[in-house]
Amino acid sequence: MTEFAIDRRTAMAGMAAAAALPIVPLTAKTRPGSFLVVGDWGRDGAQHQRDVAVQMGKTATTLGSRFVVSVGDNFYENGVQSADDPQWQSSFEKVYTDPALQVPWYVALGNHDYRGNPQAQVDYAATSKRWRMPRRYYKVPGAALEMPQIDLFVIDTSPTVHQYRDKVESVIAHNVASQDVAAQLAWLDQGLAASTARWKVVAGHHTIRSGGSGHGETREMVEMVMPILKRRGVAAYLFGHDHDLQHIERDGLHYVGCGAGSEVRPVSAVAGTKFCQARSGFAAVSVGENALSFEFRDFGGTVLYQSILRA
């Protein structure tokens, strides 16, 4: 299957799930603040990355998008080595060029980023006008987003995955070994408990629930992260890792998969699937006082799916 093709099973699952829900237009009432979500993208503009970037720019202009959330795997195949790595230009600065994308990018690290030098992505934030990664996991309060109704928590998921630590001679094992998973989980639990925002949204790279053929569920995320999100009233978990677009409602949470920033792989419906499709694209999220709505758009600008969450 080429990058342009969608297998019949995937297409049917996506269309059937989408047909089951009403299409809700994003009206002015439901979009006082909007942002975009994209993941798994850094391929020097190839495999639809540049096409997705063009549509992100158009959508950001139309919606007045205030920022972008990247859910990791920002640079393939092996991350970046420094804040001066040429991939900053070839995969980021010279790809996402639309004026409407010159806004803050709140970025998570993915497993491919851990194959390089993760600290370089933190370092780049010190000089970039838009790359925001103050540390490997962090909170962005609603006041900073000019959206008081939402708090965004960006987490660092690779250190939670046991198999990375088992490859003792690998670069990724060395990089994850230095990270304190228990400390991060405690930070997330306490931060979510203290948040009074109407919408608590968490963004990370690895899947919790997923029907993607590349990875599917991540056991450690199900065991360690999902219970925190559920207990603390998180509305949505934004993720990548599987190269597709998904919406799964399960565990009292909405899982929104946005790992289709360039390459895609087949995806199938699983328990709770509302929509899934192997199509290069991104999500646009609109935040209101009593509603959080989102839609998936593909690399050609087609709206594939829309949904709305009510407070």
Image (tube, rainbow, N blue to C red):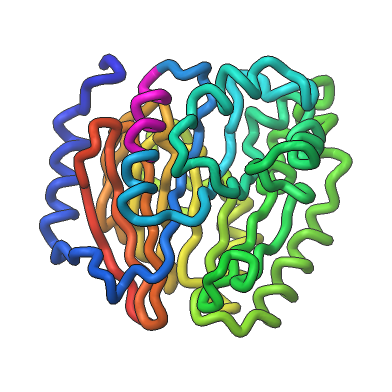
Residues 123 and 119: in front is 123
Please check the rendered image and state whether residue 171 is part of the magenta-colored stretch, yes or no: no
Q: Nearer the viewer, residue 292 or 264?
A: 292
Q: Quadrant of residue 205?
A: top right
State which region is magenta. Answer: 47-56
Q: Is residue 23 visible?
A: yes
* Closer to us: 250 or 48: 48
Residue located at (59% from left, 50% from top): 204
Q: Is residue 196 above or below residue 37?
A: below
**Residue 97 at what x, y percent from top left?**
48, 30
Kindly identify the residue that appears in the image at 18 percent across and 54 percent down.
Answer: 17
Please name the residue shown 60% across and 54% down the image.
221
Percent of width and height locating residue 183: 83, 61
Q: Is residue 148 left or right of residue 258?
A: right
Q: Quadrant of the C terminus?
A: bottom left
Residue 198 sits above or below residue 53 on the image: below
Residues 243 and 24: in front is 24
